[in-house]
Amino acid sequence: MNTATQNLEKDHVHILRLIDVMEHITQIEDPEINHLEDIVGIIRNFADGLHHAKEETIFFPLLAERGFSSTQGPVAVMLHEHEEGRNYVKGMAENISLFKSGSKQALIEVFRNMNGYAVLLRNHIAKENNILFKMADNVLSESDHINLLERFAETDENHVNTDSSNDYPLQIQSLVSHYNL
């Protein structure tokens, strides 16, 4: 049986590939600005806008119904780290704008925020995959997983339209291929 936690782990695979790209770009002296903007867009629309939305609006509330606290413990930590990630992305976006306006110092801040996000998300994903999802699988029933998967599918469907630019795994793969990663 396919599970809700496996669905979320599949998203993590793509997010980790994007982090590989980010870490690579931070080693480039003169990065392509459009790639920096693409990364921010993918994070905001896919990692946060879709993946974290599935967790925050569907998965975590069900875990709360099954006894997990949203104010302490693993779910609370995940929610806090989602906010930390949003702050890094905000820092990336603001400094990309400054960099485009001619501030060379802003690129250092873009990279600092990218590296901070990368470290945060690598650790965050490891905690979800190896701790929280295993705990969740111990308390969620087969019908819970089926319900979650249906709701995830609805969320995916409502998030994606006919515009191919919403194919986030394809966008990530394009960046991976561009940088030969």
Image (spheres, rainbow, N blue to C red):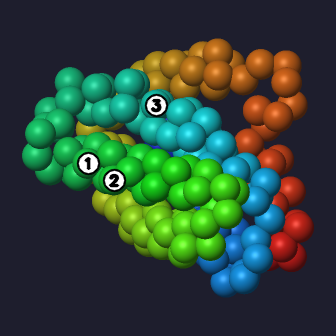
Tag 2 or tag 3, which sits nearer the N-term?
A: 3
Q: Secondary structure at mark 2?
A: helix
Tell me the crowding category of disc 2: few under 14, some 14 to 19, or many 20 or more residues within 10 angstroms, Cα based. some
Residue 37 screen position, x and y as percent: 70, 51
Q: Total marks drawn?
A: 3
Labelled disc at residue 80: 1
Q: Are marks 1 and 2 in contact (CB under 8 Å)?
A: yes
Q: Quadrant of residue 119?
A: bottom left
In the displayed orientation, state which residue is furthest to the front.
102
Residue 100 screen position, x and y as percent: 69, 57
* On-image quarter of the N terminus: top right
Q: Are marks 3 and 2 in contact (CB under 8 Å)?
A: no
Q: Secondary structure at mark 3?
A: helix
Q: Amino acid at mark 2?
A: Glu
Q: Quadrant of residue 55?
A: top left
Comparing 54 with 40, the one in front is: 40
Tag 2 residue:
84
- Taking the spot 46% from the left edge, 38% from the top edge, the residue there is 52
- Taking the spot 11% from the left edge, 46% from the top edge, the residue there is 72
Tag 3 residue:
53
Q: Secondary structure at mark 1?
A: helix
